[in-house]
Image: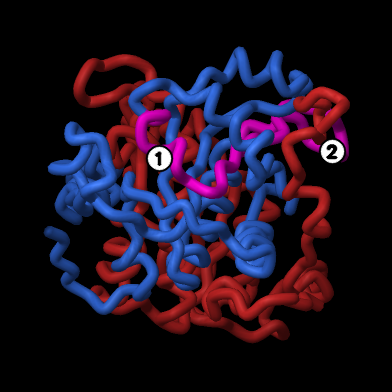
Chain colours: A blue, B red
């Protein structure tokens, strides 16, 4: 159970990462709107390093499903859309390493998740997929780093989940505020008079 | 000028990264609500690797300001709150490298930015600050990686900005959809019959 102390954005309150997906497809309009939200994330030098590789038909979905680790495959195979999130690890303007590509792409995925929630969809990001194999199978150039796989779709029925997942099917909790928001002297940054 | 094709989340539409900040302080309630939004981001193994180091009084703000590169210092020094975003680069449960700490913390910062927007604040994330010096000055342990500095506050007056920044003070644009959302055969992933 999540208890919110403040009236934070409705979509943030409602979002979590379920495993029970309906097979109902995602409309093109919704998919494009969700991607539009992802596009408007901020990024270092407005580089927009994110790249979303979208599978929403059977042949493409099969390619993606094959890449999932079994513990994800068991439930994510039902999702009507699987999206591989990559980031371009060099800057366009000077071809130097972009140390922020992962951070900025995380922001973009965050916006994606909230727009999906707003439209009645659910998302679940997975780290567990074969990134090296993905690179080979999809001929992904070195300049793109595969980061995550996202399952996107409408909520499904818990009863349809493999049994092992059913009892985990609820929003998880968070660390208390004082463990993530700290004042500057936390690490001993200000001298003792302060 | 930004043109949205879809009715995406209002806070995503409205958010951009201004440089003109008012010196008006941020209430504790708003700060905690904004941080609550940041806390509810998803993360790998629900690790919540983010850490927000908050400066909202003069001594702390001075420490943060000193760390900014001059091009950021020139405008960000007026912001009533400066937040250093760090991530814990090892997992709690096994002390192994967390390859997702930057990505997940980017998601968390994304939620932070939208809750701030909802409450009438503006945010501007900066990569340009002295991370090595930050580590020394603030005694940041190796296990935390400094990622970004965020300016948070109410909108200020463009006229108060140093002249060089005034003409840049508007939302920037984005790559077209087809450059960031691509089908799976983009890199040659499916064989030719598909």
In the image, A92 versus A136, the foreground residue is: A136
Whether residue B144 is visible to the viewer of this picture, yes or no, is yes
Q: Residue A61, percent across and down?
A: 60, 36
| Percent of width and height locating residue A187 | 25, 36
Residue at 59% x, 75% y: name it: B8
Residue extent of the magenta highlight: A72-101
Which chain letter goes with mark 1? Answer: B
* Quadrant position of residue B190: top right
Question: Is A178 inside the magenta-drawn segment?
Answer: no
**Quadrant into which the N terminus of chain B falls:** bottom right
Mark 1 neighbour density, 10 Å: few (under 14) some (14–19) many (20 or more): many
A177 or B156: nearer the viewer: A177
The residue that mark 1 highlights is B86
Q: Which of the image's four quarters has the C terminus of chain B?
A: top right
User: Residue at horizontal 61%, vertical 67%?
Assistant: A30
Residue B89 picture location, percent across and down? 38, 26
Q: How would you rate the neighbour count of disc 2 (Cα within 10 Å): few for under 14, some for 14-19, many for 20 or more?
A: some
Please give the name of the residue rendered at 63% of the width and 39% of the height, measured from the top-left corner. A58
Q: Is residue A84 magenta?
A: yes
Q: Is residue B134 left or right of residue B2?
A: left
> Which circle marks residue A163 in the picture?
none
SS label for mark 2: loop
Q: Residue at x 52, y 45 (%)?
A: A106
Residue labelled with disc 2: A92
Q: Quadrant of residue A125?
A: top left
């Amino acid at each position: 159970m999540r208890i919110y102390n403040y009236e934070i954005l409705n979509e943030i309150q409602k979002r979590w990462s379920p495993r029970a997906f309906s097979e109902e497809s995602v409309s093109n309009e919704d998919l494009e709107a969700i991607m539009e939200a992802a596009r408007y994330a901020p990024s270092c030098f407005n580089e927009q390093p994110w790249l979303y590789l979208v599978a929403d038909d059977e042949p493409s979905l099969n390619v993606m499903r094959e890449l999932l680790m079994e513990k994800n495959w068991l439930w994510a195979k039902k999702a009507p859309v699987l999206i591989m999130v990559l980031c371009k690890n060099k800057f366009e303007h000077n071809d130097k390493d972009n140390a922020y590509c992962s951070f900025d792409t995380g922001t973009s995925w965050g916006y994606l998740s909230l727009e999906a929630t707003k439209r009645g969809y659910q998302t679940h990001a997975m780290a567990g997929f074969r990134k090296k194999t993905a690179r080979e199978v999809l001929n992904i150039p070195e300049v793109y780093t595969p980061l995550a796989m996202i399952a996107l779709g409408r909520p499904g029925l818990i009863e349809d989940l493999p049994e092992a997942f059913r009892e985990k099917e609820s929003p998880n909790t968070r660390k208390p505020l004082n463990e993530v928001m700290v004042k500057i002297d936390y690490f001993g940054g200000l001298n003792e008079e302060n």
